[in-house]
Amino acid sequence: MKNISKESKIQLYFHCKNCMVIKGEDISSTEELSMGWTKKGVQVVCENCGHNILNLDFQGQKVITI
């Protein structure tokens, strides 16, 4: 069995531009993002306003999920 690191490698986060409020250097948001597999890849949607944040198409390539 592989030793899989659970440490996050995230450098940038997804945000909904419709639900963000920027006042000077203060940023707040009412967004609630949902993410999941589709038939072609992965989709991220803002549940607050319904905006499609990201839709990744893997073009038929098989992806291993852990």
Image (cartoon, grey):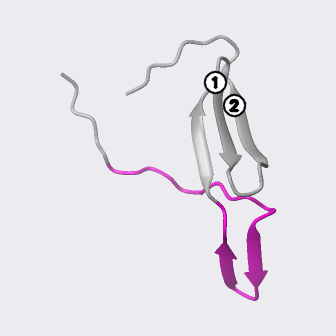
Quadrant housing the N terminus:
top left
Q: Which residue is mark 2?
A: 56
Which segment is the magenta one? 7-31
Question: Which class describes the residues within 10 Å of circle 2: few (<14), some (14-19), or many (20+)?
Answer: few
Position in image of residue 45 (x %, y %): 69, 45
Look at label 1 and name its amino acid. Thr
Q: Secondary structure at mark 2?
A: strand
Position in image of residue 29 (x %, y %): 67, 71
Mark in the foreground, 2 or 1:
1
Residue 9 drawn in magenta = yes
Residue 15 drawn in magenta = yes
Position in image of residue 3 (x %, y %): 21, 32
At x 77%, y 49%, the residue is 50
Q: Which residue is mark 1?
A: 38
- In the displayed structure image, the side of residue 4 where residue 62 appears, left or right: right
At x 44%, y 19%, the residue is 64
Identify the disc placed on residue 24: none
- Answer with the quarter of the image where residue 24 lies: bottom right
Total of numbered circles in the picture? 2
- In the displayed structure image, the side of residue 45 where residue 7 appears, left or right: left
Is residue 56 or residue 21 the one in the foreground?
A: 21
At x 27%, y 35%, the residue is 4
Q: Is residue 44 above or below residue 61?
A: below
Look at label 2 and name its amino acid. Leu
Measure how far apart labels 2 and 1 are at the Cα level. Answer: 9 Å
Q: Is residue 25 above or below residue 29?
A: below
Quadrant housing the C terminus:
top left
Is residue 8 or residue 15 the one in the foreground?
A: 15
- In the displayed structure image, the side of residue 64 where residue 39 appears, left or right: right
Q: Secondary structure at mark 1?
A: loop
